[in-house]
Image (tube, rainbow, N blue to C red):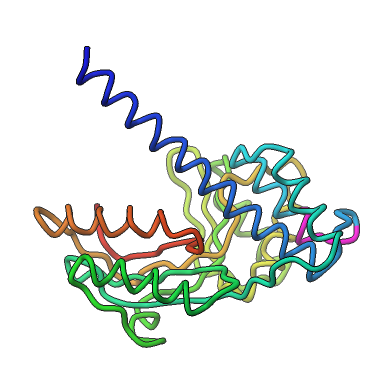
Amino acid sequence: MGRAFQNRKESMAKTAAQKTKTYSKFSKEIYMCAKNGSPEVEANPALAHLIERAKKAQVPAHVIEKAIEKARGGGGEDYAVARYEGYAPGNTMVIIECLTDNPNRTFGDVRSCFTKTKTKIGTQGSVAHMFDHEAIFSFKGDDEDAVLEALMEADVDVTEVEAEDGKITVFAPQSEYGATRAALTNAFPDIDFEVDEIQFIPKMTHPVEGEDREMLEKFLEMMEEVDDVQNVYHDAEL
């Protein structure tokens, strides 16, 4: 029982840590969105959309409300977006997005993850050219033609529309995010997005195996533990 119990305890601890990370991520984003715009959801569509995403990620209501109340109170931290690039284990290209109130601390924490896995952080633009910065929308459905027609009628410039396994995924340039979302919600009022965000998508991927894979997984776990890291994008096939 000892080993089985230890495995379960470690799994529970990891799940709890992942939840805490998710809560922290959305709390920061909601706080900044409410502070820079309006803390009133009715007057801030971006905040309403962010809260919708947080609820789908099972962020508790009290976490959301606390972030909004903090923004209403004024003062508090001012978070800035920071983005880092580099080569992780297995010659994997990575982009790390952060929200930070102390850029020097965040850079040190991120660089440490590279250093401890014997890899190197790069300069801005060193790997970004190998990724597309795109809006992604995924929802249940199989009528690809109807979706494409709705987007064309709204004069939205999309990159690709895919239908697979009962789901439709729409890719669009990040600059077309708002127009694409509006066109989809107008054409399909009952649409329920499973994915609704802007991501960095690698133009090509490559397999990472053996010791490189183990080290890459360690690198990604270390990034998860950095409080200021919001998202990590890479081109590895795991």
Q: Position of residue 221 (x, y in %)?
A: 33, 53
> At 21% from the left edge and 73% from the top edge, which residue is drawn?
119
Q: Nearer the viewer, residue 79 or 102?
A: 102
Q: Quadrant of residue 118?
A: bottom left
Q: Position of residue 34 (x, y in %)?
A: 79, 62
Residue 115 lies left or right of residue 198; in this view the side is left
> At 51% from the left edge and 58% from the top edge, which residue is drawn?
161
Judge whether 9 appears above or below 131 on screen: above
Residue 112 lies left or right of residue 59; in this view the side is left
Residue 212 lies left or right of residue 93; in this view the side is left
Which residue appears farthest toward the left when viewing the image?
Answer: 210
Residue 90 lies left or right of residue 95; in this view the side is left
Q: Nearer the viewer, residue 165 or 145?
A: 165
Q: Which quadrant would the N terminus be assigned to in this image?
A: top left
> At 74% from the left edge and 66% from the top edge, which residue is drawn?
76
Which residues fall within the magenta stretch?
43-48
Q: Position of residue 112 (x, y in %)?
A: 31, 70
Q: Position of residue 74 (x, y in %)?
A: 84, 66
> At 60% from the left edge and 72% from the top edge, which residue is drawn?
101
Judge whether 104 appears above or below 63 on screen: below
Q: Nearer the viewer, residue 126 or 30?
A: 30
